[in-house]
């Protein structure tokens, strides 16, 4: 799986639609740190999203911070804290 992620990152970095890519962390993990999250995008309504398995409304609600939050989780929390007005 590590090589698959590396290949995707290589394709993304070569894609001109993506700019200013910053790697926040580059490490291997034993298990998914956000196992309940799924990733995809398509225009949808709030009621449709409420029925999507794995959807997290991270920026609109206040999730509890785990006692042992991962580095990725702490970065997301800092991003949310510093951009609160953008997500209201």
Image: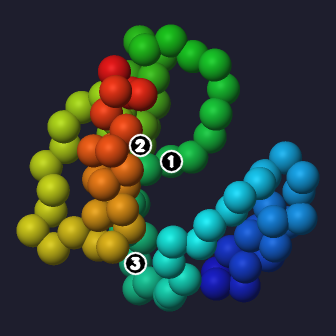
Q: How is the image coloured?
A: rainbow
Q: Which residue, given by chain and number where applicable, does mark 1 sit on?
A: 38
- Reading the image, the residue beneath label 3 is 31
Q: Earlier in the sequence, mark 1 or mark 3?
A: 3
Disc assigned to residue 71: none
Q: Secondary structure beneath disc 1?
A: loop
Disc 3 to disc 2, C-alpha distance:
16 Å
Q: Which residue is mark 2?
A: 54
Q: Is residue 13 left or right of residue 65?
A: right
For this rendering, which residue is in front, 41 or 14? Answer: 14
Give the residue at x 50% y 12%: 45
Q: Position of residue 46 (x, y in %)?
A: 43, 14
In the drawing, does residue 55 fall left or right of residue 44? Answer: left
What residue sits 64% from the left and 81% below the top? 1
Give the distance between the C-alpha atoms of the residues marked 1 and 3, in whole angstroms: 15 Å
- The crowding category of the residue bearing disc 2, from other C-alpha atoms within 10 Å (few below 14, some 14 to 19, many at least 20), is some
Q: Please report whichever mark, 3 or 2, sits nearer to the chain's N-terminal start.
A: 3
- Residue placed most toward the observer, 41 or 65: 65
Residue 34 found in image quarter: bottom left
């Amino acid at each position: 799986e590590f090589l698959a992620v590396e290949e995707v990152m290589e394709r993304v970095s070569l894609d001109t639609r993506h700019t200013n890519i910053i790697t926040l962390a580059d490490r291997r993990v034993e298990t998914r740190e956000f196992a309940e999250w799924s990733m995809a995008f398509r225009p949808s309504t709030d009621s449709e999203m409420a029925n999507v398995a794995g959807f997290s409304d991270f920026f609109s609600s206040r999730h509890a911070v785990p006692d042992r939050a991962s580095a990725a989780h702490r970065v997301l929390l800092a991003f949310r804290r510093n951009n609160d007005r953008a997500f209201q």
